[in-house]
Image (cartoon, grey):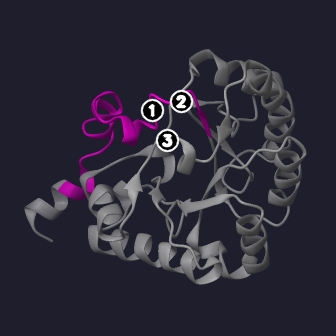
Amino acid sequence: MTAGQRLRQWLPGALYGAPLRWTAPTLAGRSTEPHIALTLDDGPDQRSTPTVLETLAKHGVTATFFLIGEHLAGHRALVEEMHEAGHELAVHGWTHMCAVAVAPRRLSDEVTATADAIADITGTAPRWYRPPYGVTTLASTDAARNAGLAPVLWTSWGRDWSRWVGPGGIVRRVNRTLRPGGTVLLHDTDRYASAGSWERTNEALNRLLPAWHDTGVPVGPLADHWG
């Protein structure tokens, strides 16, 4: 590996991605449109994702799901169901490994393989990539570009993966920084989080979605976020 490749692998979000949250609106998930982008990471998960889908359907909302590639083949029918319900499917990586721990060539191959797997199942090529943990590196940006994807982070999150945060805490944390034009990060599985965390997320959605509806600000996937 050359010195340049090592730099692209190890230069982390603290030095590269964080400043771009303010200078690159698309990376940050910020829009000038009066719209809230709802995104959910880490699925698909047969134990939890269907319940979250039912909640979204009850409130008439679609979202962007950032999927893990290694779980796609085993959940093919679920992924088809998500697509047919109108949800946007995006790339979260082949595994949930932080980008700084993956060699650049392997990272690029895995991001492309996940995008190809989503396209194979749904017939629709994904548009977005969110690196696990939101750690954006030069290598992860290269990997997204090579796969024809745009990297997207978020402006608000509920820390819903934590065992110490209940539904009310998730709601408060999301609303603390959420403004029209923002992107919300939640999770539809506890696969990489505390046990049962998705249930707290689901309950938080049942509180957030009606409240957002009452404001008149539309909620939906990233595909609708930039008009």
Residue 173, given in percent of the width and then of the height, sits at 66, 21
Residue 29, given in percent of the width and then of the height, sits at 46, 38
Q: Amino acid at mark 1?
A: Arg
- Between marks 3 and 2 in the image, the one whose residue lies nearer the viewer: 3
Looking at the image, residue 108 lies above or below residue 47: below
Relative to 38, is 153 on the left or the right? left
Residue topped by disc 2? 182
- The secondary structure type at the circle numbered 2 is loop
Query: Pointers 3 and 2 in contact (CB under 8 A)?
Result: no
User: Quadrant of the rendered structure where residue 148 is?
Assistant: bottom left
| N-term mark: 1 or 3 | 1
Rendered image: mark on residue 30: 1
Q: Which contiguous range is marked in magenta?
A: 8-37
Relative to 198, is 1 on the left or the right? left
User: Quadrant of the rendered structure where residue 218 is?
Assistant: top right
Whether residue 77 can be seen here: yes
Rendered image: mark on residue 84: none
Q: Amino acid at mark 3?
A: Gly
Looking at the image, residue 24 lies above or below residue 137: above
Query: Pointers 2 and 1 in contact (CB under 8 A)?
Result: yes
Q: Amino acid at mark 2?
A: Gly
